[in-house]
Amino acid sequence: MRILALGILLVLLFAACENPGQYSVEKDQKDVSGKTVVLVHGYSKGPADMHTLADFLKQAGYRPVTVALPLTFDYVQEAADIFEKKVGTILSELPNNESIAMVGHSTGGIVIRYFLSHSGDCRRVDRAVLIAAPNQGSRLAGMAGEVSDLLVETFATLDSLRPEKIAEMGLDVPKETRIGAIAGNKADLALGRLLENENDGRVEVASVYYPGLDDFIVVPYNHNEIHHREKTASLVIRFLESGRFTKTLD
């Protein structure tokens, strides 16, 4: 099992290097009106991975803005510092009293939580949705650390996702922001076989949940598809509008 884990983890890690050019792609949404929603991609991905969700949001009347972050070889805290500067630029183009929303997939959700916990601009964020984010840490990242220190030292983002490292980030529950989390439970990806509990092939459902969330829901998708599905987009939009994933009676 240990050899199998190492082999699969190496495939995952080195696959992250296949398309480094994607980090420079950001979708220009300056010509789109509506409430601004900042979309944050996950580990080893780029802005293009959030374009499907961006299109759903645009159709619903929102102004989606994607950002590019170094989420492979940099620690999450380093990527979060870059993210804070990008958000500052976005906010500088808006009226002082205008709020924004944030949606992150996987590690992107951790970046958002770090921003909300450590940035003075967190008060401008009234809604946030975390999709398949390892809020309690990634068991797979923990396995990588057990297999090889070199792996997590090289792929620093992965090191940041180990459960003990997530606990050290000082991630608070901000009063100003309503936060919802969406987990997937379709464990049909290869790495899901290494996880004992319900998971999406990368992240366990129990890791996506954490105390303090305003709402939490599970959908039947795997980690790679969850943020591309229309149902997920509908849940995101509902949360942005009401602060809940489910409809409530007036």
Image (spheres, rainbow, N blue to C red):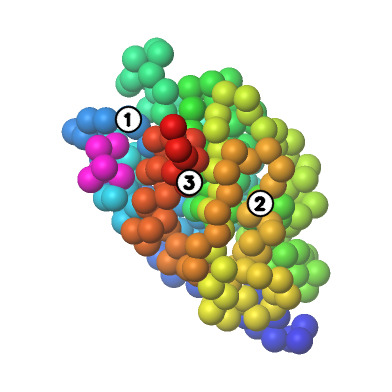
Residue beneath the point at 27% across and 30% down:
34
Q: Which mark is residue 245?
A: 3
Q: Magenta segment range?
A: 57-62
**Which residue is tagged 1?**
35
User: Which residue is at a point 66% across and 51% down the rendered structure image?
Assistant: 209
Secondary structure category for the residue under label 2: loop
Image coordinates of residue 30 in percent, x first then y, are 24, 33
> Of circles 3 and 2, which is in front?
3
Residue 8 covered by magenta stretch: no
- Check if mark 3's residue and mark 1's residue have beta carbons within 8 Å: no
Q: Considering only order in the chain, which callout, 1 or 3, is on the residue closer to the N terminus?
A: 1
Q: Is residue 130 visible?
A: yes
Q: Residue at x 76, y 86 (%)?
A: 1
Residue extending furthest left?
31
Marks 3,2: beta carbons within 8 A: no
Badge 3: how crowded within 10 Å, few (<14), some, or many (20+)?
many
Tag 2 residue: 209
**Side (left or right) of 19 relative to 32:** right
Q: Amino acid at mark 3?
A: Phe
Query: At which x and y percent is residue 47?
Result: 38, 51
